[in-house]
Amino acid sequence: MSLLVGGRPLAVGLVEFLQPYASYLLPGIFVGFLAAAAVAVALSDRFHARTVFVAGFFLALLAVNFVVPTAPYPLVSWAHFAEPTAETETYREFRVVDESGHELKMHGRMTLAFEGVSMNSLRRSMLTEYDRERNEAVARYLLLRAREYRDRVGERGLLYRLRYPNHGLTAVWTEGTLERYDAFVGIRIYEMTFVTSADGTEVVEYEEELVFESFPLGGRTSVPAQPSAMPTREMNRTVLDAGANGTVREERLMFVNYVADDERSSPINYAAARLVLAVWLVWKTVWYDWPRHVSVPFRAMAGESYAWALPVGAPWLLTVEQWLLVGLLLLFAVGYRTRATGFASAALLAHLGVVRATLNNSGETKSLFLGSFVLLFFALYADDDALSVDGLRRTADWSIETLVERLKSDAGGRYRLRGLTYSLLLLAVLFFSTAVSKVVAGDGLGFVAPDNLTRLVLVRSYVYPWYDAQLLLVEYPVLGTLGGVGTLVVEMGLLVAVLLGITVTPVVFGLATFTLSNVVLLGIFFVDNLFLLALFTAFDRVHARLALDRDLDLVFDERCRFCVRALYPFKLVDVAGSVTFYSQSDVPARYGDREDVDFGTAMYVFDDGTAHEGYDAFRELCRQYRTFLPLVGVMGLPPVRAVGRRIYRYVAANRSRHFTCDPDSAG
């Protein structure tokens, strides 16, 4: 709610007071924003610079969307409202206990939790309403279900695959997980309290209390609990599949809520999102005729508030800026000098956005600023980007022992993706604000009134002829009401889902449907929304599903830094855990005793006993994932294969001269 002074909102009065100074304030705000971003990027690993910048950014974003009646560029405003968040959350959960006292979060498919029905009411009743006898009966049921379901965990029938994917609200067991547990003997309920930091980036305090336990099948009255600590994300949100060499598999998501959990077991999502972002922005900006923005008659149409951004005397500078932006985005796409290329791209894009806004202040222009913000987040958290040119360059500082250990490790790594975390939060806030603006502007339910969308569609069918399919809403106005309600639900739902830490998949699909419906109803295609939503796709899940159904064994020279660094990207993309890396010093006897291989001259990949040497071994690694099929096809062309084999043989024979390598000391 706005403060009132003399019956008028204070924010409105303040804006009116500052209006005469706009010619100084607006460029000052724009330049000041970029200067602050530059400092934050340059000092991103010191003095909490990026944390302060991100916090300040979101404070400013909330202000211009929910308090201040105008938004100075590069900030964008979609609404005027605010909503607090809670820092303390308390949850209860069931855990199954084995004979050794080890605990396992109860599998969701044992109860209705898998169907989206919360078990909170059951836990609450057991603690506050049920008597001992009834509690024992419930515990007995759950324990028997746990034992029964344990025997069926490996089943993956058609109905299982057709189920709606698990979105992290339930624990999931696998055969690999259960191998570490003895027979189940009891049920426990824990009450867990989480306290997060003020900015919501970390858990600063955690407490858990055992509030119920039962060993209902006789023979035991208690089992000592193992030492507990803060529950890991792996316990509640991922699957540990020992059949995949211990690789952590993420929950079955189509889109990822990075605010709920900014870590993944692979950096693939970051790399894919970076590529999507670059492709979108190149495609969007390369087709604009930028010099025309300052030519006659368009110059006369431009608003004077941002005339300072227009190079009137040298319109060709906009063309130079455009192609410089394209070049920087291409470097950003591969992750080269991400801090520099990301920030420079963001600055150029923000300026071009202001130029565009002098003529067009619609969402199509504001999306340029959104792209600029996402670029900034990637630049600020460039150190999270492991699967990039920068990430691979950083491995030059690692010892060869560290590199070899990471290649051979069965434990899945954890990679933070904070650039996507803040990008999702940005998009959620803006969608929420546009929903609130619809409610406020419509005096409550005006937006969803039957005549609202009907009238809009009808008028646009005359002013902007499209085709007659949308007139179905004119014939059946209730469809307009349903569409209006659905729009508010999905626009507000994204922020709600993000803050509650639940799946965003249904909301993202709803927003995509809303975007596509505008094509049919209004002849407007908000293609920018689709690209922005695509950033949060679970690319690692798609990539894992594209893996061939086979396991590969790879033998490499652990004394060759160049060889080990060249293999590290394959370790990062092996999300299915289907490749086992062996050094020459610990090669299995089934390979070491073979006479048709010479580990001293080349790397080998073994596929069910079939040996692939050198260049062909790299091709087999790429072929393991259908994601790389185009590359595999090119590598298989006879001329390419001939040249590739020759280059590999030369590098292998001369690696001690050109790279840090000591092949003679290899075991």
Image: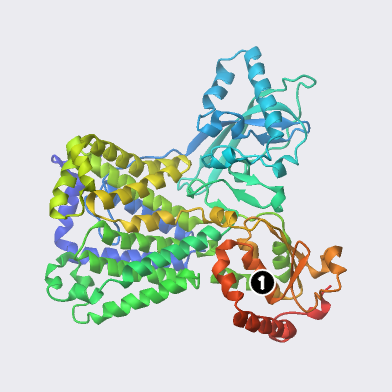
Question: Which residue lies at the image location 26% right of the left edge and 40% below the top edge?
Answer: 484
Instruction: Choose top left, top right, bottom left or bottom right for residue 496.
Output: top left
Q: In which quarter of the image is the C terminus?
A: bottom right
Q: Is residue 313 left or right of residue 555?
A: left
Q: In this view, does 44 lie to the left or right of 63?
A: right
Residue shown at 70% from the left, 74% from the top: 563
User: Residue at point 48% right, 47% down?
Assistant: 257
Quadrant where the image shows the N terminus: top left
Q: Where is residue 486 in the image (x, y as percent from the top left)?
A: 32, 39
Answer with left or right where residue 437 lies relative to residue 599. Answer: left
| x 26%, y 45%: residue | 80
Q: How far across and down, in percent of the image, does residue 636 sit?
A: 61, 75
Q: Camera-side residue: 61 or 600?
A: 600
Q: Foreground: 462 or 54?
A: 462
Whether residue 258 is situated above or below residue 146 in the rendered picture:
below
Badge 1 marks a residue whose secondary structure is: helix
Note whether 158 is above or below 556 in the view shown.
above
**Residue annotated with mark 1:** 618
How many numbered circles does the render carry?
1
Would residue 3 be seen by someone viewing this image from the given angle? Answer: no
- The answer to whether residue 120 is seen in the rendering is yes
Percent position of residue 73, x then y: 27, 61
Amino acid type at mark 1 = Phe
Mark 1 burial class by Cα count in 10 Å: few <14, some 14-19, many 20+: many
Which of the 4 quarters of the picture holds residue 392? Answer: bottom right
State the colouring used for the structure image: rainbow
In the rendered image, residue 256, in percent from the top left (x then y), is placed at 49, 49
